[in-house]
Image (cartoon, rainbow, N blue to C red):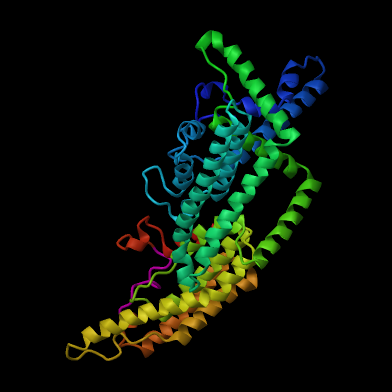
């Protein structure tokens, strides 16, 4: 069951009201009276089916509804009482920050929930203003303020989201994509806003809101004698109406998923939409949701440690590329994002090698100040060795489609090459001393920060793909 927890009085009293609009079978099922075992079995099956459907709707609703630190404020009241109010703008902007006021990392955005909650809130406020007991002049002023704050709030939010994504695109050498990401998020929010406006203005929407209000009144009347609860007024409580709109959306999505034909059509339509968006160099909702994971994947296996051998670097960069492929495939990323990442991943590889070489050059310069220091102590990386191990690791994955095979086979090839190069580069620190990567790969080394949980590198790597 959902629990209204946004704004207004008596919200917790009507917990689950909207869910009861959909699962009306509960009433009939519980009142069924029969002595037949067969009828009882059918009743139990129906009850189980109804409960399963309700649970699915609840889960879908949780994906659609997102809160922030300003969710308990009445935006409608601020629009009515203050022409210059900025609460709605601040409410939208607040989705870019956590409860402590810190800017969110890219991976901490619940994009689908944010997009739908903002869109539904705008629709709810529009409905309440247009149908509320306000003068025409007040309605015009309130609607104008609503639109102004929506545009400014979305601009603030998308700028923050774009800034969070900037390090990913900078790593790939495509900084200009930051603006495209911000614009894509703007477009998706606007699209959902229009979707929910269409719903509340439809006969279906008006009927659903009326039924939700009626259910609230009934529940409140039933509880009034015991706890003095009052019903929720969906015409004045913007938080409650927002949740009602999203509850209907959750019901519609679950119903579509349960209808095989509708689901197939939805998938086909989504594919067409994705193609259109991709052709416009924009990002889909699925793309925005996986950006955080992609950004994290760049540091899951690899860092620019100057003590790494060429084999370790090539192996870790190969696993990084594979991890990204898994993320994009499982996250239904568009061909636009996949192509953008894959065609520019070499930029990440090149910049990473350049950064390590720069560090090695500085170390060699300091080492040269001392006598008897080999000129090859911190020599530049052999990029051909890196490329060879990188390609072999990726090939191990492409040949079997198994990430575990890539982890194991990639390591064996890297280790074999490392052993050979040790004999050839005895005067080079990374081969004569190294960082113990190959020696400790299958065993725990709790003295290293890399094994803070007492795990072997092998275990950490395989779990990273789980």
The C terminus sits in image quarter: bottom right
Taking the spot 17% from the left edge, 88% from the top edge, the residue there is 370
Q: Is residue 360 above or below residue 76?
A: below
Q: Quadrant of residue 237?
A: top right
**Place of residue 287 in the rendered image (x, y in percent of width and height, measured from the top left):** 59, 59
Observer-nearest of 258 and 188: 188
The N terminus sits in image quarter: top right
Name the residue at the front extreme. 137
Q: Is residue 355 among what the camera can see?
A: yes
Q: Is residue 12 above or below residue 447?
A: above
Q: Is residue 445 among what the camera can see?
A: no
Asked whether, in this view, residue 70 is left or right of residue 365, the answer is right
**Place of residue 42 in the rendered image (x, y in percent of width and height, measured from the top left):** 79, 26
Q: Is residue 422 above or below residue 180?
A: below
**Place of residue 238 in the rendered image (x, y in percent of width and height, measured from the top left):** 55, 32
Asked whether, in this view, residue 164 is left or right of residue 253, the answer is left
100 within the magenta span: no
Taking the spot 58% from the left edge, 70% from the top edge, the residue there is 340
Q: Which residues are magenta?
A: 433-443
């Amino acid at each position: 069951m959902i629990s209204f927890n946004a704004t207004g009085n008596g919200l917790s009293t009507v917990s689950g009201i909207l869910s009861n609009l959909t699962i009306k079978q509960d009433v009939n099922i519980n009142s069924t009276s029969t002595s037949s075992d067969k009828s009882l079995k059918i009743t139990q099956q129906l009850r189980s089916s109804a409960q399963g459907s309700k649970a699915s709707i609840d889960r879908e609703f949780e994906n659609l509804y997102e809160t922030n630190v300003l969710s308990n404020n009445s935006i409608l009241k601020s629009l009515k009482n203050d022409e210059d109010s900025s609460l709605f703008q601040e409410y939208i902007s607040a989705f870019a920050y956590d409860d402590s006021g810190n800017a969110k990392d890219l991976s901490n955005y619940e994009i689908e929930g944010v997009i739908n909650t903002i869109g539904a809130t705008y629709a709810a406020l529009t409905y309440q203003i247009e149908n509320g007991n306000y003068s025409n002049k007040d309605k015009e002023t309130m609607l104008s303020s609503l639109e102004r704050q929506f545009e400014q709030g979305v601009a603030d939010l998308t700028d923050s989201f774009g800034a969070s994504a900037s390090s990913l695109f900078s790593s790939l050498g495509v900084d200009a994509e930051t603006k495209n990401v911000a614009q894509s998020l703007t477009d998706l929010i606007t699209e959902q806003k229009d979707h929910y406006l269409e719903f509340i203005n439809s006969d279906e929407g008006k009927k659903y809101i009326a039924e939700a209000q009626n259910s609230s009144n009934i529940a409140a009347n039933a509880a009034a004698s015991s706890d003095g609860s009052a019903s929720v007024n969906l015409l004045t409580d913007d938080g409650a109406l927002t949740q009602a709109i999203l509850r209907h959306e959750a019901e519609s999505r679950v119903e579509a998923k349960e209808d095989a034909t509708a689901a197939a059509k939805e998938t086909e339509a989504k594919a067409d939409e994705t193609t259109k968006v991709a052709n416009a160099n924009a990002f889909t909702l699925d793309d925005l949701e996986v950006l955080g994971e992609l950004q994290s994947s760049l540091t899951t296996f690899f860092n620019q440690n100057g003590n790494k051998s060429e084999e370790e670097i090539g192996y870790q960069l190969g696993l990084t590329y594979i991890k990204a492929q898994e993320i994009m495939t499982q996250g239904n990323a568009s061909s636009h994002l996949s192509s953008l990442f894959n065609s520019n991943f070499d930029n990440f590889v090149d910049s990473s090698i350049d950064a390590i070489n720069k560090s090695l050059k500085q170390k060699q310069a300091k080492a040269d100040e001392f006598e008897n220091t080999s000129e090859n102590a911190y020599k530049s990386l052999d990029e051909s060795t890196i490329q060879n191990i990188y390609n072999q690791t990726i090939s191990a994955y492409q040949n079997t489609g198994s990430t575990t095979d890539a982890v194991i086979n990639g390591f064996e090839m890297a280790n074999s090459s490392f052993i050979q190069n040790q004999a050839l580069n005895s005067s080079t620190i990374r081969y004569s001393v190294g960082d113990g990567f190959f020696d400790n790969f299958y065993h725990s080394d709790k003295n290293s920060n890399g094994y803070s949980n007492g795990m072997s590198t092998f275990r950490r790597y395989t779990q990273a793909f789980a």
